[in-house]
Amino acid sequence: MTSATHFDFDLSLDLDSFRSGVARRGYLTELRGTLLRGAVPDAALGDICRIHTADGKGLAAEIVGFDREVALLMPLGVLAGIRAGAEIEPLPEAAIVPVGDRVQGRVIDALGRPLDGHRYGPLADGESAPLLAEPPNPLDRAPIERALATGVRAIDGLLTVGVGQRMGIFAAAGCGKSTLLSMIARNVQADRVVLALIGERGREVRGFLEDDLGEEGLARSTVVVSTADQPALLRLRAAWTATAIAEAARARGERVVLMMDSVTRFARALREIGLAAGEAPGRQGYPPSVFAALPRLFERVGNDERGSITAFYTVLVAGDDLEEPVADEVMSLLDGHVILSRDLAARAHYPAIDVTRSKSRVMDAVVPAEQREQAAWVNRVLAHHERHEDKIAMGLYEPESREDRDLVAAHPRVMAWLAQRRDDPTGLERSRSDLARLSKG
């Protein structure tokens, strides 16, 4: 049993960690809700600024838009001590992210500062990368040709993920999404894992790190955290920071797994920012900027000629509503989806993967023909039971053929194989051999 790792988080914002070097300064003209307006000479979209406050500590804010000559800013901290006419100081060097070995095994915030500094100290000096980068040229992307071993039988056997694939995990609350993520993070065959926890409760973050991920999982991971109480800009920035760290590792030739929990909260943060900046709301209140940002986030992931990023993005759904705007859009942009079933979770069947509703769009390219046939057989077993579940439960089902009888008889074996404890990983080849034996009865 791995010993527990304990974390205490300090989420205060240290503006002295950003150097200004900029002589041009502006002033605050208006504060309404969470939107600030100011005259900031030569400001650029995305600039981080310091707004001087009454207590002298200052408030960080980011420029999110312009209204003619007026800059629109949103805070990166708590709105307190702001005065009319407060001085605004641009901090352009803030749009970089610490990357490489100095963030491996560390827990950092959306601005790249260590949250575990009391235990491990400050980050070492080293490599940095821009927060926002262009995705790889489509013609420079290496094809997805190899299977990625996750340690989860249901995925490796029936929904095989390819190296460089982007996979969505769609789940309602309480379906075991965090447990599935931790299984993958601990057991996936990769050089490095980058995990973004966006909009989670602080208690859940600590519990995930100590109980689910553990020291073994954290040792090869970088965890980027932005909790639910933090401003929308930090929740948004956490996703970009994690992606930039993964990109830098890919550029070094590493095989990286990026995990984001959740992209729904990333979208909600974008909605909050867009509406505050005056964008017109669209579907369920989401402005157009949300649906423009999602593909920019996803397209930065994948293979290039040096390394790879395979990504798992969780998506929160209300009940089983996969037609909710964010869920529908994400499903259309990714290379596959794993659906977690509330019904299976209620029966304590974990991981609660609804195999018949899930799909890996690259599986055919990375598995042998016999595995595809065996996976199709499992789908027939599960689909047949789903169609006749009530009659089977009441003992009223009468098979119409020998194949029907075989499908009914195989269902308990299939469900037993799909159930898996989080501390019981299965290698890719073992999953394939077990699947072959299962399909032969």
Image (tube, grey):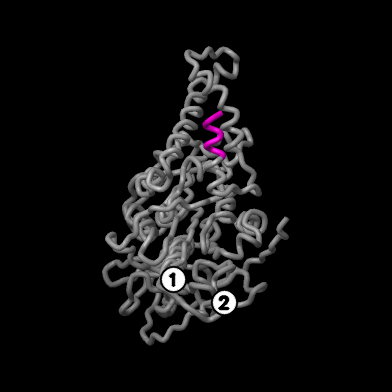
Q: Position of residue 20 (x, y in %)?
A: 43, 83
State the image quarter where residue 302 is shown.
Answer: bottom left
Q: In this view, does 226 lie above or below 402?
A: below
Can residue 284 be seen?
A: no
Camera-side residue of 300 and 16: 300
Q: Which mark is residue 123?
A: 2
Cα–Cα gap, marks 1 and 2: 20 Å
Q: In this view, does 426 lie above or below 127?
A: above
Q: Residues within 10 Å of mark 1 (few under 14, many from 20)?
A: few
Badge 1 amino acid: Arg
Q: Where is residue 307 in the image (x, y as percent from the top left)?
A: 41, 64
Q: Give the range drawn in magenta.
A: 434-441
Badge 2 amino acid: Leu
Name the dominant secondary structure of the magenta segment.
Answer: helix
Q: Is residue 138 shown in magenta?
A: no
SS class, disc 2? loop
Q: How crowded is mark 2: few (under 14 residues within 10 Å), some or many (20 or more)?
A: some
| Residue at numbered disc 1 | 252
Q: Which mark is residue 410?
A: none
Q: Residue at x 45, y 55 (%)?
A: 311
Q: Which residue is drawn at 36% across and 63% down?
A: 304
Q: Residue at x 48, y 15 (%)?
A: 401
SS class, disc 1? loop
